Amino acid sequence: MEQDPLVIGRHTFRSRLFVGTGKYKDVDETRRALDASGAEVVTVALRRVNLKERGEGSMMSLLTSGKYTILPNTAGCYTADEAVRTCRLARELGVGDLVKLEVIGDKATLFPDNEATLEAAKLLVKEGFTVLPYCIDDPIVCKKLVDAGCAAVMPLAAPIGSGLGIRNPWNLRIIVEQSRVPVIVDAGVGTASHAAEALELGADAVLMNTAIAGAKDPVLMAEAMRLGVEAGRKAFLAGRIASKLYATASSPLDGLVR
């Protein structure tokens, strides 16, 4: 896939699998899972990780090793103001300008607050951030975020950590067709077939955490997700056959011996 790069703002990546760092049993398991995933982009919850702790064996020492692009996220923020201040803090600590914007609107479902997300996105774009917003799988919301200057949109597949997979493939197809920026499916993926489906539908990448970290064998699941993403992307580029109600013979019918 070297000749099929993913471009987000000024950043270019080979891998289309973005992964998180939460819920692993220790830093060593995190490292092994990240290696197996082949991911280049790793997201970190700014409110849950000590960005200043970079001693040997720490999470930040792993992430600042030079192998990964850190994608700080604003998980746990419930207002636009909270999210913007959190992103500013990350930049002050030298994490960079690439941010995953999350403004949660409901504690039970962890669905995003569309209005607050859009408000925060506009402010962060003006301040020079490369903004990747987590949002509902709503084509209108995604279009507004793109118009606001976001470098990508990240519609959910299903509620965070649910493992339900893509619940509305039709909306995702519309989002992909109308978007001028990369579409990254975020939240709700449970297994490799879900990741493959997202890429087959035309999504540019997929982001996950619980599906890997919560598996019985996180390292093996990370490898499965890498292969699923690669297969889905190749299937999309290859162009699948059209679905038909009736059969079409695999062999030619002309010239049969009678």
Image (cartoon, grey):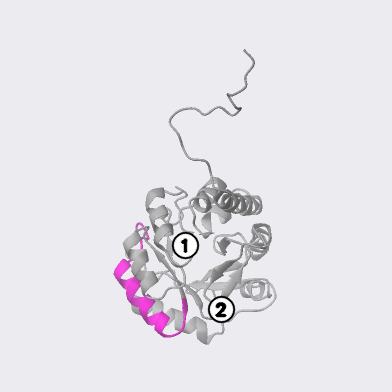
Find the residue positioned furthest to the front.
Answer: 255
Residue at numbered disc 2: 51
Q: Quadrant of residue 83?
A: bottom left
Compared to 75, does 162 lie above or below?
Answer: above
Q: What crowding class fits label 2: few (fewer than 14 Cα within 10 Å), some (14-19), or many (20 or more)?
A: many
Specify the label residue 183 is tagged with: 1
Q: Are marks 2 and 1 in contact (CB under 8 Å)?
A: no
- Residue 7 at x, y = what percent? 56, 69
Q: Is 211 within the magenta?
A: no
* Disc 2 from disc 1: Cα separation: 28 Å
- Residue 217 at x, y = what percent? 63, 49
Q: Magenta stretch: give its range.
A: 108-130
Q: Is 119 within the magenta?
A: yes
Q: Quadrant of residue 14?
A: bottom right
Q: What amino acid type is highlighted by mark number 1?
A: Val
Compared to 50, does 232 lie above or below?
Answer: above
- Residue 134 at x, y = what percent? 42, 65
